[in-house]
Amino acid sequence: MKNLAINDFKINEKDTGSTTVQIIYLTTRINEINEHLRQNPKDNASQLGLLKLVGKRKRLTKYLMKNNPSLYEKVIKAANLRK
């Protein structure tokens, strides 16, 4: 799923830094860490990393919403995020 969603939003083949690609990538990382924390609930280091990733994704989505609302809507639907 990760590669399919990222490929939809890449500007070119080597694009890893655009806002949309970063949001999709962070979403997949967040989902992976959530699964890890379900199995290891006392892993506080991973929990801290998860909170940092969620904050970064929130800042990126806020930036995208401000600068390109139509693309923001597409990314939110592709990543299954709430507004």
Image: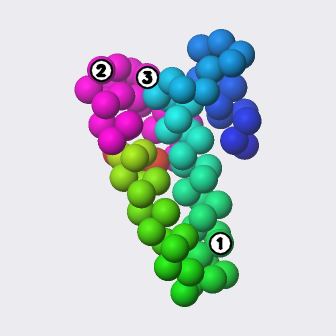
Judged from this view, the residue extending furthest toward the left is 66
Write the residue at 30% across / 20% down.
67
Residue at the extreme front: 45
- How far, Cα to Cα, is label 2 from label 3? 9 Å
The tag on residue 71 is: 3
Q: CA distance from mark 2 to mark 1?
A: 34 Å
Where is residue 24 shown, x and y percent of the image?
56, 39
Pointers 2 and 3 in contact (C-beta within 8 Å): no
Please state the horizontal and vertical placement of residue 23, each as a whole percent of the image: 50, 38
Q: Amino acid at mark 1?
A: His
Q: Using the numbered discs, state the Cα–Cα distance from disc 1 to disc 3 in whole angstroms.
A: 31 Å
Which badge, 1 or 3, is on the more N-terminal residue? 1
Which is nearer the N-term, disc 2 or disc 1?
1
- Where residue 17 sits in the image (x, y, percent)? 54, 26
Q: Nearer the viewer, mark 2 or mark 3?
A: 2
- Asked whether, in this view, residue 72 is left or right of residue 65, the answer is right
**Residue shown at 65%/12% (left/top)?**
12
Q: Nearer the viewer, residue 27 or 53?
A: 53
The image shows residue 60, relative to residue 14, as above or below, that is below
- In the picture of the structure, the residue carrying the numbered disc 1 is 36
Circle 1 crowding by C-alpha within 10 Å: few under 14, some 14–19, many from 20: some
Q: Residue at x 40, y 47 (%)?
A: 56
Q: Amino acid at mark 3?
A: Leu
Please indicate whether residue 14 sits to the left or right of residue 24 in the image. right
Label 3's element?
A: helix
51 vs 6, nearest the viewer: 51
Q: Quadrant of the N terminus?
A: top right
- Bin the neighbour count of mark 3 within 10 Å (Cα to Cα): few under 14, some 14-19, many 20 and up: few
Amino acid under disc 2: Asn
The residue segment tinted magenta is 59-80
Write down the residue under mark 2: 67
